Structure formats: structure tokens, C-alpha cells
Image (spheres, rainbow, N blue to C red):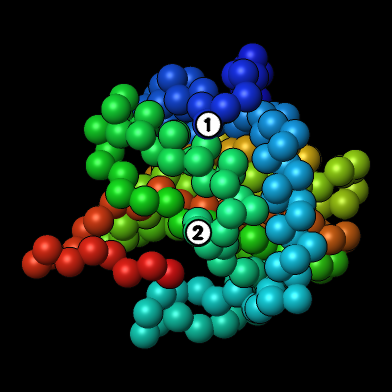
Amino acid sequence: MTHLQKPSMGNDWLPADDISEALATRGFIILPDIIPEPIREELLATVKITQPTLRPAAIGRGEDEHQNQFVRRDRIAWLDPATSALNGWFAGLECLREGLNKRLFLGLWDFECHLAHYKAGAFYKRHVDAFRGRSNRRVSLVAYLNSGWSPEQGGELVLYTQPGLDDQGTVRVTPLMGTLVLFLSEDIPHEVLPVTRDRFSVAGWFRVNDTTGQRLNPAT
């Protein structure tokens, strides 16, 4: 687990240098207690407002999108960057997008994210966020909004940092309030272990524009 000095509050509250280096060398980074209090308050307020609109999450995209409770059982609601209540959150991620492009030349075009709620018994089996060369998602992000989490409550994020080695080469992340994780979408399989209490997070993706003919990728 990476321990970093938290940057001063502003749109640059995420340490772009450390994140870029970690993505380039290891493919992931874990940032405990990195989300500033005002941003946490924004997200927690959004949880309360958004809960009634949550719907069962699906797998696949476009014509292939469907629900499969054997794979995942979380409920989600997509978050709108135009929502003024989330100005600090999206401004920080936009600052990071620019920082990653400057340092890693990733060509990241935008950022999309949703709120995720795992009720007791919910999980998300091992998967990748993007199949190599077939998706516009390049960097995945997960932010946790859970106070007082204990190990017996489950819900850990498992990163398979050395794919093909089963349980070897894994990293487990406790979904504690303020923790943020980033990893390469095409390279790091991962899963969410079953939970025994409500678990809230924001899952997001920095994307590239991989369409042709001067067309932009559609919003989710």
C-alpha cells in the first residue's frame, strides 16, 4: 500500500506524479485517505440523493449489455459531470486527466463514473474493465465511501496484478472511507468480494476517443 503526503486542497488534490509513475511501473496505485473532506461530503450527499435511482448493474455494453446476477449484484447510478453538487469531484478528476496525459501521453479524452451500492451478499466476480484493443477505457478508478469498515464485513477489492497466477500476485484493498485506487483497465483483472453490510463506492474510467469519421464516443 502506498503512503503519500496529501496535496493541499484545490483541483490538484490527486498526486499526478506519483499516480503516473505507479501506473507506468506497476499498473496500479492505492491511495489511502486521499480524498479531501469537502469532496467526501459532496459524494456522501450524492449517495443520499441518488439512492432512489439506483438500478441493477449490467455487464457488457451496447447490444451486448445484459444483467447477470451470477457475475455481479451491485446497483448503480451514473453521475453527471454537469451536476453542480459534484463540482469538486469532477474538477479534481479533470485535473488528473490532464496530468496523466502530460506525463504518460495516454490521449485520455474524458472521464465517466457511477455510484455503486453493494447490499449484503452482493459481489462482482473477477473481470477486466476493458479487453485489450477493443475498448476506450484506459485507466480505472474506485473511490470508497464507507466508515468503520472491518475485515469480517468483506467487500475487499482484489487486484490480480500478475494475471494467470490465480491467487498469487494479488493485492486486496479494504473499502475504507477516503481510499482511492487507480489501475490500468486493460491489464488488471479484479473482483469485489461478497459483503455483509452496505458498501458504497464510485467507480470511474478515463477514456480515449476511439471512434472514426470525426465522431466522438457517446456518453454512457
Name the mark on residue 132.
Answer: none
Q: Nearer the viewer, residue 82 or 191?
A: 82
Residue type, numbered disc 2: Ala
Q: What residue type is labelled 1?
A: Asn
Residues tagged 1 and 2 counted as in contact (Cβ below 8 A): no
The x, y position of residue 208, in whole percent, is 29, 51
Tell me: residue 117, above or below residue 144: below
Element assignment for label 1: loop
Q: In this view, does 58 lie to the left or right of 32?
A: left
Number of numbered labels in the structure image:
2
Residue 137 position within the rendered picture, expressed as x and y whole percent measured from the top left: 37, 54
Q: Nearer the viewer, residue 192 or 55?
A: 55
Residue 180, can we see it? Answer: yes
Q: Residue 82, which numbered label?
A: 2
Residue that sits furthest to the left in the current view: 213
Q: Residue at x 9, y 67 (%)?
A: 213
Q: Is residue 191 left or right of residue 47?
A: left
Quarter of the image with the N terminus is: top right
Q: How far apart are marks 1 and 2 (CA)?
A: 16 Å
118 vs 40, nearest the viewer: 40
Residue 56 lies, with reference to residue 106, above or below; the image says: below
Q: Name the residue under label 1.
A: 11
Q: In which quarter of the image is the C terminus?
A: bottom left
